[in-house]
Image (cartoon, rainbow, N blue to C red):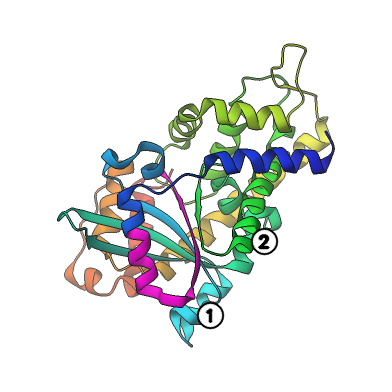
Amino acid sequence: MNATQVMAQLRQVIEADQAPLSTPAQTMAEAIRARHGAAVRALIFYGSALREGEAAEKMLDFYVIVDSYRAVHGRGLASLAAWLLPPSVHFLEITDANGNRLRSKYAVVSEAAFLRRASGGSLESMLWARFTQPATVVTDDPGLRARLIDTLAHACRHFAAQVTPLLCGQQQPGDVWVRGLCESYRTELRPENPAPRAIEIVARFPERYARLSAILLPQDKDGAPDLPDAGGLRRMACAGKWALRRVIGKPLGALRVLKAATTFDAGLDYILEKVASHSGVKLEVSESERRHPVLHAPKLAWRLYRAGAFR
């Protein structure tokens, strides 16, 4: 296949992922739109709640695509920080018509930043690796929808190109995707072991990832992925890029945590609860630390690191 045919088939995979939002996700999407008004151009629903369905009682994860950060944050440091280090993370808790509590962690990012970063225009893998997973695009703008679908297709193609030099020979259809997600998770401030999470994500959609592998990877005579030896220099260069991503990813993650303290309305207790659920590390904080998380963030981050919260 030529490049045009590859992209056309990748778009078909992404289109097949599209489905109506679940009732809780639709209710939350409407609440996010109401909160930020006309600034919202599109929402992208993804994550464990999408994978596991309504009964999972999971946090509802969205990326919220906006025209500009000023439309959300106004003029000031928050807007500048969002532009310098996107995205900005927010929290929203609502009660639906049946009295059920719904919670969302959503990331606000400009359209320009999302299209560039998620399609592979950033060394950082956070966006283009995340959106090799199924995601639902929600927008009333057909042109923007087409651009976002195209971006998600580019994310899959870029991901494969950044991972395949690390592997050689016959592979299972999901192997490249598990390896790449593990590599990407290791660049982030994640408390949990990345391998089980990566395996679980790929195992939940075996046919989808097999289809992506068939489009993007060389196949043997039986149709199984069969990767050529990239050669020592190319393999070392690829591994070096992932090492560089780990070096820069941890500090950038720490900066995002500091920045999130100004927008993540759930507060410090929620963040520590999530760290404890993933790593088993529980941290007691003082009332002063709870009231002023930004001021105490460096000390708290160091205590969590020393306690082994971030593997």
Front in this rendered view, residue 97 or 81: 97
> Which of the two discs, 2 and 1, sits closer to the camera?
2
Magenta segment, prevailing SS (helix, strand or loop): helix
Name which residue lies at 53% across and 80% down: 80
Near mark 2 (Cα within 10 A), the count class, few <14, some 14-19 or many ≥20, is: some
Q: Is residue 80 visible?
A: yes
In this orientation, does residue 262 appear? no
**Of 41 and 212, the residue lying toward us:** 41
| Mark 2: secondary structure | helix
Question: Residue at image x 55%, y 69%?
Answer: 85
Residues under numbered marks 2 and 1 in contact, where contact means CB atoms less than 8 Å apart: no
User: Which label's residue is closer to the chain start, 2 or 1?
Assistant: 1
Q: Amino acid at mark 2?
A: Arg
Could you say which quadrant of the image residue 182 lies in? top right
| Quadrant housing the C terminus | top left
Q: Residue 217 placed where, x, y %?
A: 73, 29
Up/down of 229 relative to 295, above or below:
above
- In the displayed structure image, the side of residue 13 where residue 70 appears, left or right: left
**Residue 138 x %, y %:** 49, 57
Residue at the spot x=35%, y=55% of the render?
Answer: 26
Residue receiving disc 2: 116
Q: Amino acid at mark 1?
A: Leu
